[in-house]
């Protein structure tokens, strides 16, 4: 039994060993077997669900510290190759220095009609802080116009100015004294009623004016279009005039101007107070001995107040002004005026043509000083009124065809109240004085102006004006010309020879006369019409030559009225014939 069991165990062990041997043998043979076995079947595979652990974000309440980042640039040398080339020598641009200034200047000479001339100037040189200067002049004629009695005259001037430049402002003063001495020589000596003792009499009908003229300005520096700054200008004018026959005048003018830019618009306002006090004889008359009798003295005070707010607006090519001028003429009574102040211009082709138009008005101050400068032969007892320009409508075109050629053509229509005319005075003179006559006038003016300038070597300027008068009460605009033409030339030849030329042409005028004599003064062929005597056109041509020996010394000669025309600007007042004046200048 036991042996049987052992045999069974051994038998089982042999079977196990045999199976292991067969299994290993099959593996070895399967390595080298190239046969392929394909098995097809079906199965069920299940993938179990996976479970993920939930991780939720948690806020961290803390301040993060950023570490400073440091950069380090590693130096690296770049190898360069130089190719040397020849360099031409440098040329310096040398700016020419400013012309040397001389503080003093003297000009003296003498001419026909025994005419001595002396002019002196002395002033400061270039300075950014101040400027000042003095001036003196004397000129006289010691001979008379033939057949016109005593026509001697003398002029004298003395004055100076001072200007101070501050950081933001400029201050300027000017004070002048002038003396004019002459005679009312416009007497018809062919008239048998004239006293022959008046001929060549130095004491007959003399006049001497003394003028003290003061001007002052205080302005802000130009700030351009700075919208943060207010710019302003102030001015004051005063003059004292004294003449024979108890005539005195005090004129005072003070004004101010202020403005500010707001974006593209400039808002401005002007204010002026104009006061004039005139003391003059109420009447002047001649007695039987031709002595002038002076009547009572009366004092006339008048004032003009002006206030002018306006706006300037600018575009790319246009500029416009819109404003209103409020003025009051205060004489025996007060008369207020409201004038428009409108102006518009437009630029075409980069300022080649600039058409413009406007509408304005003004109360014009007539002082005795302004009247006697226009006509020095006015009688001292004439009534003085201001002229009111009720409407001035104008339009034109100006421009520049090149940097050397500019032009301006304009037409205007004015309505003038109390327009000043000149007629002969027969109560205080033999008609050799004029008195003021006023009328309401509509005046049309055509004007043309042309200028050509080539650097500082050549300049030619010409201007022509033509007037059309429409009067209310008078037949003519007495003693007013119908046209005026002027042309001036300046030529510099190599800074050695200077040539100056002027041509003045004044159109015909009509003088009011109360009677006509058979013989006209100096045989002029005047035309009488409607109580007036028509004066012919005046032509005055002047020529001046100057030779500069050096920068300090020069010589000159002037030919005035070299056509020898004894024309009359005022009726019965012929001018001197050809007048030659020569002399020299010296700078120091």
Image: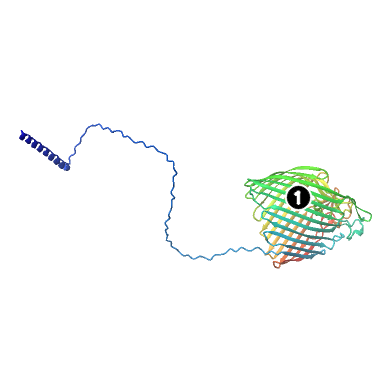
Q: Residue furthest right?
A: 288
Image quarter where the C terminus lies is: bottom right
Could you tell me if residue 425 is visible in this image?
yes
Residue 230: where, in percent of width, then height? 67, 48
Residue 114: where, in percent of width, then height? 82, 64
Residue 54, relative to residue 225: is it above or below?
above
Quadrant hosting residue 143: bottom right
87 horizontally vs 329: left or right: left
Residue 336: where, in percent of width, then height? 78, 42
Instruction: Find disc 1 in the rendering and name its residue.
Output: 254
Q: Residue at the spot x=58%, y=63% of the render? A: 93
Residue 90, relative to residue 343: is it above or below?
below
**In the structure shown, which secondary structural element does the residue marked by tag 1 occupy?**
strand
Count the marks: how many? Answer: 1
Quadrant hosting residue 64: top left
User: Badge 1: few (under 14), some or many (20 or more) residues near its Cα, within 10 Å?
Assistant: some
467 horizontally vs 516: left or right: left
């Amino acid at each position: 039994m036991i042996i049987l069991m052992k045999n069974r165990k051994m038998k089982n062990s042999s079977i196990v060993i045999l199976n292991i041997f067969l299994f290993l043998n099959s593996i070895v043979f399967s390595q080298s077997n190239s046969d392929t076995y394909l098995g097809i079947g079906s199965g069920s595979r299940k993938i179990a669900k996976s479970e993920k652990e939930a991780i939720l974000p948690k806020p961290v309440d803390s301040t993060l510290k950023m570490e400073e980042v440091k950069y380090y640039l590693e130096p690296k040398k770049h190898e360069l190759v130089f190719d040397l080339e020849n360099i031409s020598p440098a040329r310096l641009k040398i700016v020419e220095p400013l012309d040397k200034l001389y503080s003093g200047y003297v000009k003296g000479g003498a001419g026909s009609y025994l005419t001595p001339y002396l002019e002196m100037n002395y002033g400061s040189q270039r300075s950014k802080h101040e400027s000042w200067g003095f001036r003196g002049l004397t000129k006289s004629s010691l001979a008379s116009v033939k057949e016109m009695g005593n026509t001697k005259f003398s002029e004298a001037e003395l004055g100076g100015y001072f200007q101070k430049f501050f950081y933001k402002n400029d201050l300027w003063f000017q004070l002048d004294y002038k003396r004019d001495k002459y005679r009312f020589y416009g007497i018809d000596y062919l008239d048998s009623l004239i006293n022959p003792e008046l001929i060549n009499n130095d004491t007959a009908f003399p006049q001497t004016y003394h003028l003290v003229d003061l001007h002052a300005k205080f302005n802000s520096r130009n700030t351009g279009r700075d919208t943060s700054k207010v710019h302003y200008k102030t001015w004051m004018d005063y003059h004292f005039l004294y003449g024979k026959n108890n005539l005195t005048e005090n004129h005072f003018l003070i004004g101010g101007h202020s403005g500010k830019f707001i974006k593209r618009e400039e808002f401005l306002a002007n204010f002026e107070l104009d006061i004039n006090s005139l003391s003059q004889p109420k009447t002047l008359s001649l007695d039987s001995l031709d002595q002038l009798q002076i009547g009572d003295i009366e004092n006339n005070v008048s004032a003009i107040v002006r206030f002018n707010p306006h706006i300037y607006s600018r575009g790319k090519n246009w500029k416009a002004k819109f404003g209103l001028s409020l003025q009051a003429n205060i004489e025996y009574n007060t008369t207020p005026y409201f004038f428009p102040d409108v102006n518009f211009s437009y630029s075409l082709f980069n300022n080649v043509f600039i058409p413009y138009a406007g509408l304005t008005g003004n109360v014009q101050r007539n002082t005795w000083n302004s009247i006697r400068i226009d006509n020095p032969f006015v009688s001292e007892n004439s009534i003085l009124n201001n002229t009111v320009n009720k409407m001035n409508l104008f339009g034109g075109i100006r421009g520049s065809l090149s940097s050397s050629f500019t032009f301006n053509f304009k037409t205007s229509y004015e309505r003038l109240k109390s327009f000043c005319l000149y007629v002969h005075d027969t109560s205080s003179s033999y008609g050799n004085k004029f008195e003021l006559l006023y009328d309401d006038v509509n005046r049309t003016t055509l004007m043309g102006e042309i200028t050509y300038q080539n650097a500082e070597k050549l300049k030619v300027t010409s201007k022509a004006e033509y007037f059309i008068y429409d009067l209310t009460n008078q037949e003519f605009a007495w003693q007013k010309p119908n046209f005026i033409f002027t042309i001036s030339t300046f030529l510099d030849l190599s800074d050695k020879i200077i040539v100056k030329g002027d041509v003045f042409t004044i159109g015909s005028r009509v003088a009011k006369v109360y009677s006509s004599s058979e013989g006209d003064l100096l045989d002029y062929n005047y035309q009488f019409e409607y109580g007036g005597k028509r004066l012919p056109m005046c032509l005055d041509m002047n020529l001046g030559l100057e030779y500069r020996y050096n920068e300090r010394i020069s010589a000159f000669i002037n030919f005035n009225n070299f056509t020898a025309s004894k024309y009359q600007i005022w009726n019965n007042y012929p001018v001197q014939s050809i007048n030659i004046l020569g002399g020299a200048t010296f700078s120091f």
